[in-house]
Image (tube, rainbow, N blue to C red):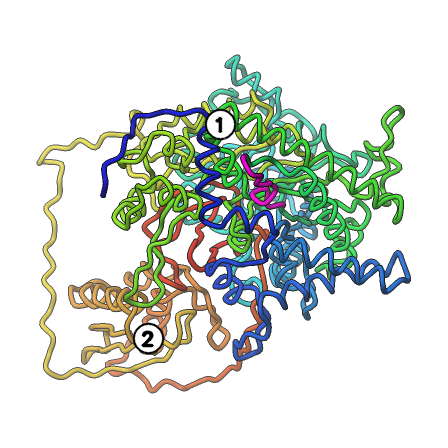
């Protein structure tokens, strides 16, 4: 690779000039100016795998153009509720089609997947109220199952539930507290396959003054509980002030309203931040700030958000989200590149019209949700492609210029969304609850069609479809490896970076390989100004992540999807400082992710962790287990198990006394990582059995592991390891006390899985910034990343939360 001058710094204007020349030379500028409809290869892969209509055999029935036309036609039908003109409807259909086909605006994934199809469930997430009675709790569990079945996620506040140990009047017993009931919701989620294929996503919130707050903060500490929940603590500004002053605050029983005790605010805050450092949960929601911006206080207080945290909702409200691709909102002139504010305004107006129509065309999972959604007509106009915009303008992500540009862009989006909503109200009327809303106050009357219409949601796969960077996040990578076949590696790069590298003369395949491994330009031999402009998430400090979130929050009605990323070496105090900064800068919530904190249990907690010390006298001598030799002949039984990985065949060989001796497991399809990992599990299980480990102990270690759950004749098989455990358990149960295994009686129970539909929040489930993981995509075997609060594959669009 040629050596380049790496120490030269240049101005923003000069950086923009050089990038503009490179982008023009690469043909990208012409695509943007001409409003090109061209999709990237990766976009088409994602659409084929996850969005395009398919028949029961999985054959694709439409192309991307057909999908956009299907969605546009379906959503335009809502216009006929307000006009009898078919010509007007066709104009609307073409506007909707154009704004999506040109990759300028995208509704959330449920709308792209389901509009014009049988399901017609277009919302991403919902909030359900949980009252302090068994009837209410288990009615909500039932409703949660229905919502997850239809492809939605759910948010809850459990703050109304009486604390653990409180009296239960009807029985004279004591209450088990909110955390125990959250486990009931988690269990229901675990067994209801969302949209026929995946589990749903949930948000659980508890007020900081609830007597069970400490148990809640620690509820995910072991990594084994509430795996289907994000959790957040609802704090107030008063609580944060008491944290700073190291003062106590009151705990209040929600059943009686009486003070039951006090806790030191700083000590609670310290435990909260330690758990966030250790596990990523809980986050913080500033609920009093959220309610100051509640557009419909006459309908009640906002208690919860959607699973990703960016959309506060009243009970039974729904998410209705879409995102503007600001990377396309520029204009390349003969000598410059500038914001195209007219194009932005046009796209916002069409997008607002589209989201309002979604409310009418949606097939809601519950009648209460339909009533509330149509009463408030809440929408969420958001943003994606912000980092791509910064690159085109030559602006460094972690800079004052970027903060100013972000605020400017978001203010314009908010202004235009309000104008579009008020224009719709002139034709269609205000939303039904407008009379008592904040928009109908003396001296400040705005006739709005929609409540709180601006939200910055995570954009997940719709940003891949649009060929844009995700939300307001930094670039996640400038180069990455995509596995296109079993033994073929394809190194792909960010198009803007590749254009600049070619134009400036430092491009090489070696550089792209190095960049794919390192994830950052920091230690590579490229010009300093290029390093400044092409900053990745690895290069951005937590402080700048928070400051960027705050800049966008200023002009966002609801909240901003963003997780603050930390290196593994970050301290608990680093996390605490980010939480304080979020409070000081006016954010409405914050979620953190420390690299590696969700990969496994933390063994040491820094300077407060316990140090194990022992002398030789204290240490018991280990028992050495020697595996028994395998005999030349051995009897066995083979069972077929249907799993999410395909048909699995589990052979259990046994000794004369009927005890399992070894396990062999194979998948119907040979080769690949799944088969290799299954072989490893079987070898280790066999080694344990031959070494005298009880079969029941092997079952205990393997059962419950979850990945690609699948129903097999009425039994939920959570993963390949779980299938091995199930087969072993059936063998044990069927042959207890027998020297030879009894002949099994085959029982056939037909189970027809439901067709796959979208689940999660539609834009990726969660709010986060990228963090590399050691895990591989189950669909294409490419390494996955942690972005927007969820594991995601940037190659094929697989998303654990969708």
| Residue at the limit of the structure toward the front, as seen here | 334
| Secondary structure of the residue carrying numbered label 2 | strand
What whole-number distance in Å separates the C-alpha atoms at marks 1 and 2? 58 Å
The residue sitting at 23% across, 74% down in the picture is 659
Which portion, as a residue range, is magenta? 324-335
- 652 vs 305, left or right, is left
Toward the viewer: 466 or 790?
Answer: 466
Q: Nearer the viewer, residue 420 or 149?
A: 420
Bin the neighbour count of mark 2 within 10 Å (Cα to Cα): few under 14, some 14-19, many 20 and up: many
Mark 2 or mark 1, which is nearer the start of the sequence? 1
Q: Which residue is mark 1?
A: 13
| 131 falls in the magenta region | no
Q: Residues within 10 Å of mark 1 (few under 14, many from 20)?
A: few
Residue lying at 47% horizontally and 33% vertically, measured from the top left: 17
In the image, residue 595 above or below residue 790 = above
- Residue 370 located left or right of residue 762: right
**Vertical placement of residue 46 versus 561, above or below:** below
Quadrant of residue 478 within the rendered picture: top left
Callout 1 touching callout 2 (CB < 8 Å)? no
Q: Is residue 21 visible?
A: yes
- Give the image location of residue 35, x and y in percent: 61, 52
Residue drawn at (87%, 30%) of the image: 445
- Residue 214 is situated, as x and y percent measured from the top left of the image, at 50, 32
Residue 787: x %, y % from top left: 46, 45
Name the residue that disc number 2 marks.
Answer: 667
Q: Is residue 215 visible?
A: no
Q: In the rendered view, would you say 743 is above or below 646?
A: below
The label number, if any, that marks residue 101 in the structure image: none
Which secondary structure lies at badge 1?
helix
- Mark 1 or 2, closer to the camera: 1
The residue lying toward the viewer, choosing from 187 and 657, is 187
């Amino acid at each position: 690779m040629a050596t380049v001058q790496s120490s030269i710094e240049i101005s923003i204007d000069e950086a923009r000039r050089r990038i503009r020349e490179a982008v023009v030379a690469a043909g990208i500028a012409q695509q943007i100016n001409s409003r090109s409809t061209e999709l990237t290869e990766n976009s088409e892969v994602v659409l084929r795998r996850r969005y395009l209509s398919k028949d029961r055999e999985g054959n694709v029935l439409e192309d991307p153009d057909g999908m956009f036309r299907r969605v546009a036609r379906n959503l335009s039908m809502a216009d006929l509720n307000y006009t009898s003109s078919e010509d007007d409807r066709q104009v609307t259909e073409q506007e909707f089609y154009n704004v999506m086909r040109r990759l300028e605006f995208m509704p959330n994934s449920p709308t792209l997947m389901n509009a014009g199809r049988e399901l017609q469930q277009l919302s991403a997430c919902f909030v359900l109220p949980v009252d302090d009675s068994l009837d209410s709790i288990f009615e909500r569990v039932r409703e949660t199952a229905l919502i997850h079945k239809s492809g939605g996620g759910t948010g809850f506040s459990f703050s109304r539930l009486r604390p653990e140990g409180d009296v239960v009047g009807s029985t004279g017993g004591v209450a088990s507290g909110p955390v125990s009931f959250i486990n009931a919701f988690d269990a229901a989620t675990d067994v209801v396959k969302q949209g026929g294929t995946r589990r749903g996503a949930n948000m659980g919130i508890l007020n900081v003054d609830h007597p069970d707050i400490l148990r809640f903060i620690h509820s995910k500490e072991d990594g084994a509980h509430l795996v289907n929940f994000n959790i957040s603590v609802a704090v107030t500004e008063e609580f944060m002030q008491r944290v700073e002053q190291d003062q106590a605050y009151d705990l209040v029983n929600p059943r009686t309203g009486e003070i039951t005790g006090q806790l030191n605010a700083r000590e609670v805050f310290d435990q909260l931040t330690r758990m966030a450092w250790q596990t990523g949960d809980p986050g913080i929601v500033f609920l009093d700030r959220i309610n100051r911006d509640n557009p419909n206080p006459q309908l009640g207080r906002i208690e919860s958000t959607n699973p990703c945290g960016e959309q506060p909702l009243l009970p039974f409200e729904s998410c209705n989200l879409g995102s503007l691709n600001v990377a396309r909102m520029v204009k390349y002139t003969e000598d410059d590149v500038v914001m195209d504010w007219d194009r932005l305004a046009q796209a916002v107006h069409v997008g607002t019209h589209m989201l309002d129509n979604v409310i009418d065309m949606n097939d809601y999972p519950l009648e209460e949700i339909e009533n509330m959604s149509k009463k408030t007509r809440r929408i969420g106009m958001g943003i994606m492609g912000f980092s791509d915009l910064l690159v085109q303008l030559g602006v460094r992500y972690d800079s004052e210029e970027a903060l100013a540009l972000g605020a400017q862009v978001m203010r314009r989006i908010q202004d235009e969304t309000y104008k579009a909503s008020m224009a719709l109200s002139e034709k269609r009327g205000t939303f039904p609850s407008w009379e008592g809303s904040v928009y109908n106050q003396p001296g400040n009357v705005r006739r709005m069609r929609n409540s709180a219409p601006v939200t910055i949601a995570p954009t997940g796969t719709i940003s891949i479809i649009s060929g844009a960077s995700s939300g307001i996040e930094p670039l996640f990578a400038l180069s990455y490896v995509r596995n296109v076949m079993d033994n073929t590696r394809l190194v792909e790069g960010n198009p803007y970076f590749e254009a600049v590298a070619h134009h400036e003369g430092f491009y090489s395949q070696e550089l792209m390989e190095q960049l794919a491994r390192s994830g950052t330009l920091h230690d590579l031999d490229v010009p300093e100004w290029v390093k400044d402009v092409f900053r990745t998430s690895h290069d951005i400090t937590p402080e700048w992540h928070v400051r960027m979130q705050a800049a966008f929050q200023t002009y966002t009605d609801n909240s901003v999807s963003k997780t603050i990323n930390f290196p593994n070496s970050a301290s608990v105090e680093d996390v605490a400082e980010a939480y304080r900064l979020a409070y000081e800068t006016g954010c409405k919530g914050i979620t953190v992710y420390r690299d590696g904190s969700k990969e496994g249990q933390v063994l040491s907690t820094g300077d407060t962790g316990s140090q194990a010390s022992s002398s030789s006298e204290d240490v018991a001598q280990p028992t050495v287990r020697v595996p028994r030799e395998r005999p030349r002949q051995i009897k066995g039984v083979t069972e077929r198990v249907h799993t999410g990985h395909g048909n699995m065949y589990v052979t259990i060989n046994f000794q004369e006394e009927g005890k399992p001796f070894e396990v062999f497991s194979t998948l119907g399809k040979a080769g690949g990582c799944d088969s290799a990992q299954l072989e490893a599990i079987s070898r280790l299980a066999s080694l344990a059995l031959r070494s005298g480990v009880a079969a029941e102990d092997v079952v205990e270690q393997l059962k419950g592991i979850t990945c690609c759950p699948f129903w097999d004749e009425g039994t939920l098989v959570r993963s390949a390891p779980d299938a091995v455990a199930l087969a072993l358990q059936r063998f044990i149960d069927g042959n207890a006390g027998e020297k030879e295994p009894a002949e099994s009686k085959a029982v056939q129970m037909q189970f027809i899985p439901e067709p796959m539909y979208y689940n999660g929040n539609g834009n990726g489930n969660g709010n986060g910034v990228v963090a590399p993981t050691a895990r591989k995509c189950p669909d294409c075997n490419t390494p996955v990343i942690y972005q927007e609060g969820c594991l995601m594959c940037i190659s094929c669009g697989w998303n654990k939360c969708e």
